[in-house]
Image: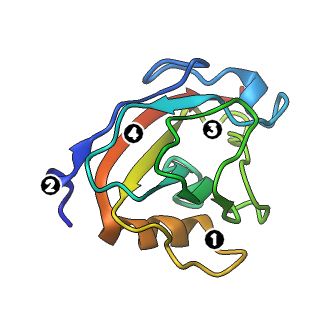
């Protein structure tokens, strides 16, 4: 499905604003817990959500910090430090959220929180699926998408 055909979802966090720094509490320099997220009503036909957080500025290329899928369609928020749905294995090799942790002195990194509204109840992924697999499996089922970008830099 083309992105132009996707319904736009609002995706916000009480921890940071679009394009602004992510507080250290939500990074490897703090408690390394996920920030609170909330979103608006999805398009009709939404049967689940999937969430992916990645850093395209990582030295080795796109680095995925979180993948969650099979999130119930009635959900509209995730509290700070909480997880919903099934948790994928991030690029740190652990299930669930792994906060921003760019190399010191590497400059500002941009973290893309992407929420997909899906027309499928389940993505059918195997246990221990990787965050990259979540996004790959979600794209063909996406009927809506929201994105929130936060930044983080370690000096």
Task: Say few, some or many: other residues with alpha carbon within 10 Å of mark 3 (under 14 / 14 to 19 / 20 or more).
Answer: few
Which residue is label 2 attached to? 5
Pointer 3 with pointer 1, Cβ within 8 A: no
Image quarter hosting the C terminus: top right
Task: Say few, some or many: other residues with alpha carbon within 10 Å of mark 1 (under 14 / 14 to 19 / 20 or more).
Answer: many
Q: How far across and down, in percent of the image, does residue 60 sit?
A: 59, 61
| Label 4 residue SS | strand
Which residue is label 1 attached to? 130
Q: How far across and down, in percent of the image, does residue 133 sit?
A: 53, 73
* Mark closest to the chain's N terminus, 2 or 1: 2
Task: Say few, some or many: other residues with alpha carbon within 10 Å of mark 4 (under 14 / 14 to 19 / 20 or more).
Answer: some
Which residue is label 4 attached to? 147
Which residue is label 3 attached to? 106
* Mark closest to the chain's N terminus, 3 or 4: 3
* Mark closest to the chain's N terminus, 4 or 1: 1
Pointer 2 with pointer 4, Cβ within 8 A: no
Mark 2 → mark 3, Cα distance in angstroms: 36 Å
Mark 3 → mark 4, Cα distance in angstroms: 24 Å
Instruction: Judge whether 54 appears above or below 21 on screen.
Output: below
Left/right of residue 145 with respect to residue 84 in the rendered view = left
* Mark closest to the chain's N terminus, 3 or 1: 3
Q: How far across and down, in percent of the image, does residue 84 sit?
A: 66, 49
Q: Quadrant of residue 15?
A: top right
Front of the two marks 2 and 4: 2
| Label 2 residue SS | helix
Q: Residue at x 72, y 75 (%)?
A: 128
């Amino acid at each position: 499905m083309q992105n132009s055909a996707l319904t736009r979802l609002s995706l916000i966090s009480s921890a940071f604003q679009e394009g602004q720094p992510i507080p250290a509490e939500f990074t490897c320099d703090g408690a390394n817990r996920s920030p609170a997220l909330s979103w608006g009503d999805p398009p009709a036909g939404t049967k689940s959500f999937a969430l992916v957080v990645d850093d395209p500025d990582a030295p080795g290329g796109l680095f995925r910090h979180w993948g969650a899928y099979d999130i119930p369609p009635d959900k509209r928020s995730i509290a700070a430090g909480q997880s919903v749905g099934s948790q994928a294995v991030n690029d740190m090799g652990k299930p669930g959220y792994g906060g921003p942790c760019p190399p010191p002195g590497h400059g500002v990194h941009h973290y893309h929180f992407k929420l997909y509204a899906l027309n499928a109840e389940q993505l059918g992924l195997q246990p221990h699926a990787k965050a990259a697999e979540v996004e790959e499996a979600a794209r063909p089922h996406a009927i809506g998408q929201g994105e929130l970008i936060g930044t983080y830099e370690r000096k």
